[in-house]
Image (cartoon, helix red, strand yellow):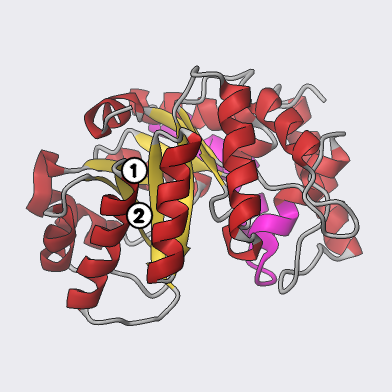
Amino acid sequence: MNPQELCSRLNGVIGFPVTPFNDDHSLDLDGHRENVRYMLEQPMCALVAAGGTGELYSLDPDEVRQVVEATIEETAGRVPVIAGVGFAGGLAKRLAKQAADSGADGVLAFPPYYPNAEMDGLVDYYSDIADASGLGVLVYSRDWAHYTPTQAERLAAIPNVVAWKDGSADIRRYQMIRERLGDKLHWVGGAGDDMVPGYYGIGVRAYTSSISAVAPKLSIKLHELGVAQASDELNQLITEHVVPLYALRTKRKGYEVSAMKTMLNMIGLRGGVVRPPLVEVAEAEQEELKRILEGWRRAGFLDR
């Protein structure tokens, strides 16, 4: 898929499957395949294989390859598959080339492991990823990598950099970047399902959803209400069914992943365990997750 075609497909919910592990922390590829099939029962516009929710940072290169290839096989061309890429220069280039060789449709470029790098070095980092893959590159602005409009413009000038995924939840900064670059990039909301009102309010029409791994119907409904600008209904849905989960996820670092895996386990799918340094959800907070799941069932967003 060429970069322009990829962007044309990114309108709606971009699903973020977890990467399931067995109790011994080995890769559970069969579980991953089952989870992907479940997510695709709803109209995802794309899937990200081995992204942040997919614990990219805990996988070795061969495991990343296996996860990407399994995702591609399960989607069977129905939706684009975007592969997570990151770490450092040499490893990032290896993962980018590997993604292309595996048949991925694009790459999601995480910031390099070295924080607060000089902008010249960051341009080289993203350029290397684009060159190595030949695929459309989504720049993922998150953690320390909060770019100014001028810096974003430099990254947008890199061939094959075609989209921007905001992971900072700074709507003011994101709006300034979009005003500076206009249609030079495709815009994706990436800080969480709870940010749909903010993103869609400024004209974004695609977002990455971790809730989609557990309750894809809920993710799709958030998108539909955002597009319709049905503010009252959207905000009620966010308040009742999204904010409680995101409030729990802030209680401990890593819960943004382990909470989703715990919920998958609870509904009979394959979340498995997390790998260190992430921690499992405490027993008391598991009870909160059960209550959230029950609320999703009563509202018709969960059939399991």
Q: Which of 64 and 162 is in front in this view?
A: 64
The image quarter in which residue 201 lies: top left
Instruction: Tell me if label 2 and label 1 are in contact, CB under 8 Å.
Output: yes
Left or right of residue 182: residue 105? right
Helix, strand or loop at mark 2: strand
Which residue is located at x 34 percent, y 43 percent? 188
Could you say where residue 216 lies in the image, as x and y percent from the top left? 62, 29
282 in magenta: no
Amino acid type indicated by mark 2: Asp
Left or right: 293, with 219 as reference point: right
- Magenta span: predominant SS is helix
Left or right of residue 59, residue 122 in this image: left
Percent across and percent down for residue 32 are 72, 37
Question: Which quadrant holds residue 76?
Answer: top right
Q: What residue type is labelled 1?
A: Val
Magenta range? 231-259
> What residue appears at the point 75 percent right and 71 percent down from the top-left corner?
276
Which residue is labeled 2 in the image? 166
Please name whichever residue, 154 or 102, is drawn nearer the observer in this view of the structure: 102
Q: Which residue in the structure is indicated by mark 1?
A: 188
Dot 2 surroundings within 10 Å: few (below 14), some, or many (20 or more)? many
In the figure, 23 relative to 183: above or below? below
